[in-house]
Amino acid sequence: MTEISEMTGLELFNQAETGDQVAMGRLLSLAENRAKETLDLIQKKGVISHNCCVMGITGSPGAGKSTLIGNLLSVWKTEKKKVAVLAVDPSSPFSGGAVLGDRVRMLKHSQDENILIRSLGTRGHLGGLSACIAETVELLIALGMDIVLVETAGAGQIDVEVAEVTDTTIVMLVPGWGDTMQVAKAGLLEIADIYVVNKKDLPGAETAARDIEVMLDYRQSTGWMPKVMMTKADTGEGLEELWGGVQEHQAYLSSTGERETRRRHHLAYLIRRMALAQVSSTWDRTMLVELAREVMAQETDLTRATRKALEFLREDLKAVCMGEI
Amino acid sequence: MTEISEMTGLELFNQAETGDQVAMGRLLSLAENRAKETLDLIQKKGVISHNCCVMGITGSPGAGKSTLIGNLLSVWKTEKKKVAVLAVDPSSPFSGGAVLGDRVRMLKHSQDENILIRSLGTRGHLGGLSACIAETVELLIALGMDIVLVETAGAGQIDVEVAEVTDTTIVMLVPGWGDTMQVAKAGLLEIADIYVVNKKDLPGAETAARDIEVMLDYRQSTGWMPKVMMTKADTGEGLEELWGGVQEHQAYLSSTGERETRRRHHLAYLIRRMALAQVSSTWDRTMLVELAREVMAQETDLTRATRKALEFLREDLKAVCMGEI
């Protein structure tokens, strides 16, 4: 039998499909660290239509995301769902960044064979951190997960990019997180399918919910009207309703054909990533540094140097397009 | 006279060169929001050799970065330096994310005509947030700044990428930030030129400094040996020494030719960005979504779809390489 450490991507995938947690872990490491190889693997496996619920949860540190996820995991456990949690928030206990108590609470779930918890490193490749999320989600879908949940930190860019690969996006806030205008500013207004005002017993919770609703009223939209829900994550209040809301949104996606549309967009994103991986591997640093030297020595200018870099690319693509690679 | 709001990039640049703060602000907005236009402007202006001190400061929220920068600004003010601070840390008072007291302390400097403080938004384009930093720094160098300081949040990816465009990188820690292993884990060990242990009066400060030194001993290096310094940012203790350390590193870069080498690498990065901007603008979403549809309908597979995307690119590059664009 081949040792897991020596398996190819495809062997790892097949082993992970049997439910082997070690193989699954290695497979996700592959997705995180070796983009090219992972994309090759996805190309080999092909892509599938699926009923996986791909969710994103975002919100500032302290909003209660981890507590919420921890309690959702308990719900999903009873329903015997196969779940993967991907944490890209550096302050999350899933990512190892929070206080001991939180982490202990989470760890009890990591023992469950149906639940995979994974922290995505903060050093991405080929276009940053968010990049490997697309591949990782694709692999998890192919492995037959019922739910894939991506947790991000609400810092803007990454959350918006994560929405490129998820179907239902939850934005979490707490009363006093600051102005709800922060949400609008961070570009989260356009991407949220469900808003959750957590710590609903705190003063200002009702106001925060109303503010969001007012902002939503100003938004022109003919499709899904984002829900505004209230929870108290630590006691579990409102969690069943939230999960109900997510399922309602998923049903909406299926019935309107929006699920197919989103899937096409996710795949378009993947194709772009694959093509870009090819392009990136073309420009070796030495060539670019030599071009930079010529610019410094005033033998050429930036415009010409850029054109030269593109010529190199075009020459290189000839072989690719001929199908030689 | 042309209104600033209607100026082209080049006009803005010329106006900013005269010291006009409004024009400078607009120019930086251009760099942040319109990558292509900015890269065109940089191509038009050409690039220059320079003596600008381009520094990066990174460290977790609460390490005291803003206090340190605030007090460094006071030093630089006395020395009549032209300084630009670029804040990409969402928790920084420069970025508007901190408690009122901090922000007020900073604001006094923003009134100074030699000091430009700028918060870079969290929604980047063409490869993320870090992307626009390269262009912004290039513009600030061209505008004749003595010091450009980029503040990041110590979250990993972004810090490592910022080091691609800075010459001297400072990594700040506090005793009890957690293990100094965190630093190594985040990939910051390879990029720091100077370590600062802040809040040096706290217990564990000496230990933290020693830990870093031990880690550095294990690092194979023939060039610059990173300094480990101790400060108390709020009282200003150790700040003169820190600024001395930065200048020492800058002198080292100049005397060894390393400054030239780094400059070439920064330019190589810019050329790559420019070429990539061209490539990215080629793939329109419609074409990619159509390819995705074909994959979903099993009319083609991912490999062929990717190849097709590259063929589109190659065709498009023909015009570019012929110099028609």
Image: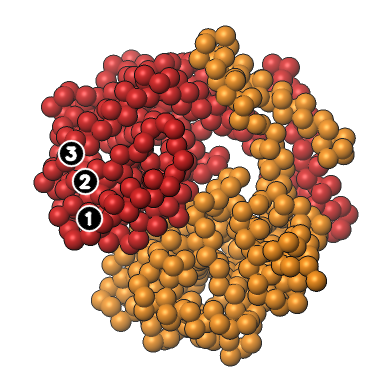
Chain colours: A orange, B red
* Mark 2 vs mark 3, CA separation in Å: 9 Å
Q: Amino acid at mark 2?
A: Met
Mark 3 secondary-structure assignment: helix
CB under 8 Å between callouts 3 and 1? no
Q: Amino acid at mark 3?
A: Leu
Can the viewer see residue A231 in this picture? no
Dot in front, 3 or 1: 1
Does residue B9 sit above or below A256 in this rendering? Answer: above
Q: Nearer the viewer, residue A155 or B206?
A: B206
Crowd tier of the residue under label 1, counting other residues whose Cα lies within 10 Å: few below 14, some 14–19, many 20 or above: many
**In the rendered image, which residue does mark 2 sit on?**
B230
Q: Nearer the viewer, residue A299 or A146?
A: A299
**In the rendered image, which residue does mark 1 sit on?**
B205
Mark 2 secondary-structure assignment: strand
Q: Amino acid at mark 1?
A: Ala
CB under 8 Å between callouts 2 and 1? yes
**In the rendered image, which residue does mark 3 sit on?**
B239
Q: Is residue B235 left or right of residue A1?
A: left
Q: Quadrant of the C terminus of chain A?
A: top right
